[in-house]
Image (tube, rainbow, N blue to C red):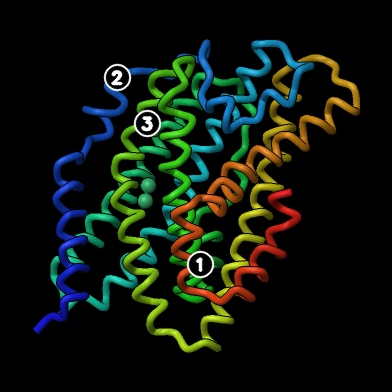
């Protein structure tokens, strides 16, 4: 016999399956539709790119910053989806001979992340064809996945929940309302957002299930792991924001003062920290879930570790 709690959880998984089936899309038929990227338009919206901090750039240069960041934005999702898909397959083991509804929901989740990775590989090739040569996306999906998957499941699910919640916040708060974006770029993130909405619900269910298994000592270690994962994300952002600034300087093809170059490097890093860390950790839903699992002292420990990054 299932408990009332189990029934409620099964119902949430059933709902995730139902929505997933209803909105399911195809890369070519629904998203790309034979289109190319319009490089006369922006990719990433201003609210995410922080381009307003760079008044010394002309309109074309600002658009280039938006396109470089928008290209990295797609690549970052392709990067994290490698570990997310693997983790979901791993935790689905608990349902193999149990709740078949939860199992189906997690298998669909993994299948969608595989499709998203293909989508992001496809559009990286398309963006490469329409932008000047010299862009490099440095982090390697399998290296990052190996490092992430070495941490406790609680921490990995916490990081994942954070990512899948900020994906939704970015779309609703910045991407959807910006009418000056490349239509194809915007559609990629419209379709991605539709499937990610279900993922965030499942992340929370699985994170809470994992949380219930932990002793206080294990949870204390899991909090340390989560802090280390965020620090590792920040390391990736420092590396890629530097590479993207170098690419911009090469492609822009004009002289910038050393103060302007410093401002560009700083803005690129701040923008990436905002996109991939700060906007997620400040998300109301994320804070509510996290706050319900950990102590006040643990919350302060996370806050202190994040301090220099979110400043
Ligand atoms: Fe995804
Ligand atoms: Fe996802």
Q: From the viewer's perspective, is the residue at label 3 or at label 2 nearer?
A: 3
Where residue 248 sits, quadrant-wise, is top right
Among numbered discs 3 and 1, the one appearing first in the sequence: 3
Q: Are marks 3 and 2 in contact (CB under 8 Å)?
A: no
Alpha-carbon distance for marks 2 and 1? 45 Å
| Badge 2 element | loop
Residue denoted by label 1: 291
Q: Is 124 or 20 nearer to us in this picture?
A: 20
Position of the N terminus by quadrant: bottom left
| Nearer the observer, 179 or 122 | 179
Q: Is residue 130 above or below residue 220?
A: above
Q: Is residue 92 above or below residue 2?
A: above
| Residue 224 position within the rendered picture, expressed as x and y whole percent measured from the top left | 62, 75
Task: Answer with mark 2 or mark 1, whichever residue precedes in sequence.
Answer: 2
**Residue pictured at 56% horizontal, 37% vertical:** 72
Residue at screen point 44% across, 85% down: 214
Q: What percent of the width, then of the height, locates residue 111?
A: 26, 53
Which quadrant would residue 153 be assigned to in this image? Answer: bottom left
Q: CA distance from mark 3 to mark 1?
A: 32 Å
Q: On the picture, is 143 further left or further right than 177?
A: right
Q: Considering only order in the chain, which callout, 2 or 3, is on the residue closer to the N terminus? A: 2
- Depth check: give the residue in front, 235 or 118: 235
Residue 296 is left or right of residue 96, and the answer is right
Would residue 6 appear left or right of 178 to someone viewing this image? Answer: left
Residue topped by disc 2: 34
User: For the residue carrying disc 2, how many other residues have a C-alpha within 10 Å: few (<14), some (14-19), or many (20+)?
Assistant: few
Q: For residue 188, which numbered disc appears in the image? A: 3
User: How far across and how far down the image is residue 11, in percent?
Assistant: 15, 63
Question: Considering only vertical position in the picture, is 116 above or below 227?
Answer: above
Q: Is residue 137 left or right of residue 81?
A: right
Q: Nearer the viewer, mark 2 or mark 1?
A: 1
| Distance from the alpha carbon under mark 3 to that under mark 2 | 13 Å
């Amino acid at each position: 016999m299932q408990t009332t709690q189990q029934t409620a959880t099964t119902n949430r998984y059933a709902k995730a399956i139902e929505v997933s089936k209803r909105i399911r899309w195809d890369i070519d038929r629904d998203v790309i539709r034979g289109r190319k990227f319009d490089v006369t338009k922006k990719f990433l919206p201003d609210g995410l790119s922080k381009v307003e901090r760079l008044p010394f750039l002309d309109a074309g240069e600002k658009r280039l910053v938006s396109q470089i960041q928008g290209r990295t934005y797609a690549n970052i999702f392709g990067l994290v989806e490698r570990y997310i898909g693997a983790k979901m397959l791993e935790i689905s083991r608990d349902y193999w001979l149990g709740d078949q509804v939860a199992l189906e929901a997690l298998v669909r989740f993994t299948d969608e992340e595989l499709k998203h990775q293909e989508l992001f590989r496809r559009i990286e090739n398309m963006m490469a064809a329409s932008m000047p040569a010299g862009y490099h996306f440095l982090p390697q999906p399998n290296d990052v996945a190996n490092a992430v998957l070495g941490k406790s499941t609680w921490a990995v699910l916490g990081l994942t929940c954070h990512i899948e919640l900020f994906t939704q916040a970015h779309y609703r708060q910045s991407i959807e309302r910006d009418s000056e974006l490349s239509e194809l770029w915007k559609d990629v993130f419209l379709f991605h957002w539709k499937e990610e909405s279900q993922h965030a619900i499942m992340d929370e269910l699985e994170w809470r299930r994992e949380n219930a298994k932990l002793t206080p000592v294990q949870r204390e270690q899991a909090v340390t792991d989560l802090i280390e994962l965020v620090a590792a994300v920040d390391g990736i952002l420092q590396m890629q924001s530097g590479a993207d600034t170098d690419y911009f300087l090469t492609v822009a093809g004009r002289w910038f003062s050393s103060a302007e170059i410093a401002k560009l490097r700083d803005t690129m890093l701040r923008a990436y920290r905002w996109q991939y860390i700060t906007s997620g950790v400040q998300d109301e839903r994320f804070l509510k879930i996290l706050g319900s699992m950990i102590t006040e002292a643990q919350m302060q420990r996370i806050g202190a570790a994040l301090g220099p990054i979110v400043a």
